[in-house]
Amino acid sequence: MSSAKQSAMWDLQLQQLLLPKSDHDASECEDAIAVDIHTARFAVADGATEAFHAQQWARNLAEHWVRKEATLTIEDFRKWVAAEGRELHDSWNGLTLSWYSEEKARTGSFAAFVGVEQRLKMLCLMTLADV
Amino acid sequence: MGDSFSGDSVRKKAEFVAEVVNHTLHDLVIRCTKTEEVRNYYHVSVIGYGRNVSTCFSGPLAGRDMVPISDVADFPLQVKSSYKRVSDGAGSWVEIPVRYPVWIHPTADGKTPMCAALIRVKDILQRWLAEHPRGFPPTILHLTDGESSDGDPDEVGRQIMTLGTDDGPVLLFNCHISTRRSAKMEYPTEETALPDGFARSLFAMSSRLPTNFLAAAAQLGVHALEGSRGFVFNGDPSSIVQFYEIGTSLTGMTPYKWMDVDSSETS
């Protein structure tokens, strides 16, 4: 952890709640939440219901972002999202898909994303929709 | 449906309607697809009438009046291969292979037993509503190219409109298509400008367009107002496409655009 983060004056308490929609079970929930106390990063991602592998995409975004120490610039974020997207697409190669899954995969995956990093007396927010 | 649209000497109405219905089913399946699973957000019935009144599904779905959308997805009559032009993201176009399911083949024969067809629809609805009293109210998209040959459909149409679920009444929308060059009337709010008794009868048995459907119409550039009925008279090919796009916009989603697809088949 960086010295700036170590000396932060904040006393944060954190509780994660991930609730599926009414009449749905947890496995159907396409949202993701992630925390890494070493990087002081927190993230939530809301996978788009109609997208292909939205749950996996939301998890990748949230869980991978909190582990990164990259700067919070839009340029770095774009590069990182593009690399994550390629990795997700590559994971679909070789799958034998039905006609409808094949078409769905062609349109890709979508999620809304919010990431927060705690710094000295400051919270930095990174938020994008439909990445 | 055996004749052609005015100005289209090649494609018969039945062929065009079958194409629109196939694309509509395709659209519904894609909306319900979550990764590799199709969720049963819809149940679908496709009834045709002419010489007989019967379900239009054949092959593995033959004889089934009401089919969950996952079965529609898994049991098309055939899956064709074709190509679709898409942007390459760098200002050019590329062709990519796509697969097209087909459920309905064009059929045109006999008269127009509209009353018998609507009685069949009412029967299917009553059975479905008994099993799904809390579901989203069913929508009936009725397409005809002529006047009823077995009586006035007004009474059975009104009976259908009295059915419903806890969530609201059944929605009955009617689209009359014509090969004549008569002026088309789309989604009118009142019957005064309609040309004859047949048009007024169809108007009377057409539900008002709810808010979500009005939003879908607006997205398509279709003129529809608060109080507009789900009714088209003397419609042309574009009327049919829009009628199905508006009529299946149940959840306020952006209407699915399929007209940009290159329909040339390779097998």
Image: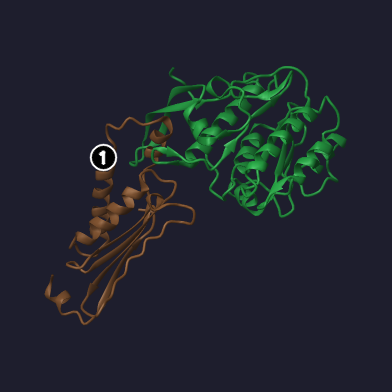
Chain colours: A brown, B green
Residue A39: quarter of image:
bottom left
Can you identify the residue that label 1 sits on? A91
- Residue at the (65%, 39%) spot, across then down: B128
Q: Is residue B198 visible?
A: yes
Q: Residue reaching furthest right?
A: B197
Q: In the rendering, at what x and y percent does residue A103 appear?
A: 41, 35
Residue visible at 81% across and 48% down in the picture: B190
Q: Is residue A59 above or below residue B255?
A: below
Q: Is residue B215 above or below residue B83?
A: below
- The quadrant of the rendering that contains the C terminus of chain B is top left
Residue B161 in the image: state x and y as whole percent. Answer: 76, 44
The answer to whether B136 appears left or right of B208 in the picture is left
In the displayed structure image, the side of residue A91 where residue B167 appears, left or right:
right
Residue A58 pos. (x, y %) = 33, 53
Alpha-carbon neighbours of circle 1 within 10 Å: few (<14), some, or many (≥20)? Answer: few
Q: Residue furthest front?
A: B131
Q: Given the image, what chain letter belongs to the residue carrying mark 1?
A: A
Q: Is residue B103 above or below residue A82?
A: above
Question: Which residue is located at x 30 percent, y 53 percent?
Answer: A59
Q: Is residue B235 visible?
A: no
Q: Residue at x 49, y 53 (%)?
A: A23
Query: Which residue is more in the foreground, B136 or B134?
Result: B134
Identify residue type, mark 1. Answer: Ser
Please identify the quadrant where the N terminus of chain B is shown.
top right
Q: Quadrant of residue B211?
A: bottom right
Q: Is residue B43 above or below residue B65?
A: below
Looking at the rendered structure, the secondary structure element under dot 1 is helix
